[in-house]
Image (cartoon, rainbow, N blue to C red):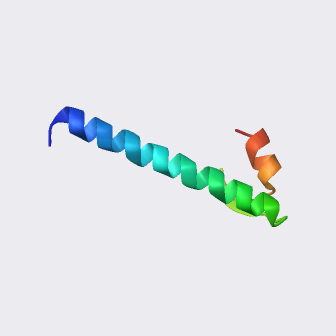
Amino acid sequence: MSDFEIRELQERIDAGILLAQRRLIERTRKDNGDLVVMRDGEVVRLTPDQLLAKQ
């Protein structure tokens, strides 16, 4: 694989990850749920709105 192909593939992977994150946040918001994330070595429960506000 050339460097160009590797960069192109990495961009597609990154875009797919971001799309999956957005879908997870939206689904959790619709279900009135919490997201569990690791922040500074601690497990934290956040609402989707709290997560988006901290970004």
Name the outermost residue toward the top. Answer: 4
Image quadrant assignment for residue 38: bottom right
Residue occupying image coordinates x 60% and y 53%: 21
- List x then y, in percent, for residue 23: 64, 55
The residue at 40%/48% (across/down) is 13
- Residue 42 position, x and y percent, is 69, 59
Identify whether 9 is placed above or below 20: above
**Residue located farthest toward the right when viewing the structure as drawn:** 32
Residue 42 in view in this figure? no
Q: Position of residue 41 (x, y in %)?
A: 63, 56
Horizontally, residue 16 falls left or right of residue 40, namely left
Residue at left 74%, top 43%? 52
Residue drawn at 72 percent across, 61 percent down? 27
Relative placement, left or right, of 13 versus 17 is left
Left or right, 46 with respect to 22, comes to right
Can residue 23 be seen at all in this image of the molecule? Answer: yes
Q: Quadrant of residue 20?
A: bottom right
Q: Quadrant of the C terminus?
A: top right
Image quarter hosting the N terminus: top left
Q: Residue furthest left?
A: 1
Disc tally is: 0
Residue 16, percent across and down? 47, 50
